[in-house]
Image: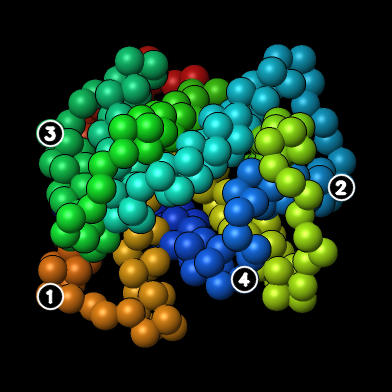
Amino acid sequence: MKIKTSSLTDIGLTAIAPAIWGSTYLVTTEFLPHGYPLTVAMLRALPAGLILLLVVRQLPQGIWWARSFILGALNFSFFWAMLFVSAYRLPGGVAATVGAIQPLIVVMLARMLIGTPVRTLAIIAGIVGMAGVGLLVLMPGAALDPIGIIAGLAGAVSMAFGTVLTRHWSPPVSNLTFTAWQLTAGGLILLPIALLFEPSLPIPTTVNILGIAWLGLIGAAFTYLLWFRGLSKLEPAAGASLGFLSPLVATLLGWGLLGQNLTPLQIAGMLAVLVSVWLGQRAQMAPRAAAPIMAKTVSP
C-alpha cells in the first residue's frame, strides 16, 4: 500500500506534538517548583492562549464561545487536572499505562459521535501501544490507588472526547485561531480553581521561568497548533495513536539526560510503541479508497 506524500507530511507534523509532550515530565521535575500542579497547568495554558489571541486578534462568535470552553475544558483544564491527580496518587508507570487506554476510547467515541467505522487494525494498534507503554514505564510492585486509577481513566476519557469533538466540530477559522481560543478558555477555567485550591506560587527563579516558557510556548501553543491541524486531517484514532510517542520520548530523555537505566524490557516496549504507531496509521490509510461515500456522510 502506497501512502501519499501529503499524508506522510500530516502524520509527521502531528507526531511532533506528542514527541515534545514527552519532555513535560523532565521539565516539570527539573525546572518547576513542586506542589503547584493546577497553577503550573494554568500558567501553561493561559499566557500562551493570550499571546496567540494577540496575534490572531479574533474572538469566537456565536456557538463557538461555548464550543471553545467545552474543548478547552476537555483538552486542557479537566484533562490536565486529572492527569496531575493520577500522577500524584500513582507511580508514574501506572499513571502512564492507565492513560494509554485513550486511543481505544477514541476508536469507540469516533464510532458513536461521527460514524467512523471501528477497524480491527486500530484496535490492535491500541492494545499493542498499551502493552508497549506498560513495558516502558511500569515497574514491579507498583501500587494501585483506586482514586488515582479513576482519575487516570477520567483524564483519558476527557482527552478522547476532546480529540473526537475537535474533528467533529470543524472550526470556521485557522488552526492558529482555534488553538488560541481553546488554550485561553482552558486557562481561564483553571485560574479560579488554582487560586482556590493551591497556595500562592513562590517568586519564580530563572530556571522556573524557562520551564514555564517551554511548557507554555513550545509544549502548549506550538504543539497544540500542530495537534489540532493534524486532527483536522487525520482520523481521530490515527491521531490518538501518535500519543504513544510521549512516554517513548520521556523514557529516552530520562536515559539520555538524567542517566536513568534502559532495560531490555523497555527496549521491547519502545519497539512495541513504534509498531503500534505504524499500525495506527495503516488503519487510517487502508479504507480511504474504498469508503468515499462514508467520508461524505460523516463529515462535520
Q: CA distance from mark 3 to mark 4?
A: 42 Å
Mark 1 highlights which residue? Answer: 264
Of labels 2 and 1, earlier in sequence is: 2
What amino acid is found at the position of numbered circle 4 in the picture?
A: Phe
Q: Please, what secondary structure does the residue beneath circle 2 have?
A: helix
Look at the numbered discs 1 and 3 and tell me whether their residues touch, using CB distance below 8 Å.
no
Mark 4 highlights which residue? Answer: 31
**Residue 231, how many percent across, how many down?**
47, 40
Of labels 2 and 4, earlier in sequence is: 4
Of labels 3 and 2, earlier in sequence is: 2
Look at the numbered discs 3 and 4 and tell me whether their residues touch, using CB distance below 8 Å.
no
Of labels 1 and 4, earlier in sequence is: 4
What amino acid is found at the position of numbered circle 3 in the picture?
A: Thr
Frontmost residue, 184 versus 77: 77
**Residue 5, how many percent across, how many down?**
37, 59
Q: Please, what secondary structure does the residue beneath circle 3 have?
A: helix
Q: Is residue 248 visible to the viewer in this orientation of the structure?
A: yes
**Residue 141, how many percent across, how many down?**
18, 55
Look at the numbered discs 1 and 4 and tell me whether their residues touch, using CB distance below 8 Å.
no
Question: Given this view, does label 2 or label 4 mark the residue nearer the observer?
Answer: 4
Q: Which quadrant holds residue 229? A: top right
| Structural crowding at the residue carrying mark 1, measured as other residues with C-alpha within 10 Å and reported as few (<14), some (14–19) or many (≥20) | few
Mark 2 highlights which residue? Answer: 54
Frontmost residue, 209 versus 165: 209
What amino acid is found at the position of numbered circle 1 in the picture?
A: Pro
Q: CA distance from mark 1 to mark 3?
A: 29 Å
Q: Please, what secondary structure does the residue beneath circle 1 have?
A: helix
Image: 117 above or below 177? above
Q: CA distance from mark 3 to mark 2?
A: 44 Å
Q: Which quadrant holds residue 205? A: bottom right
Mark 3 highlights which residue? Answer: 120
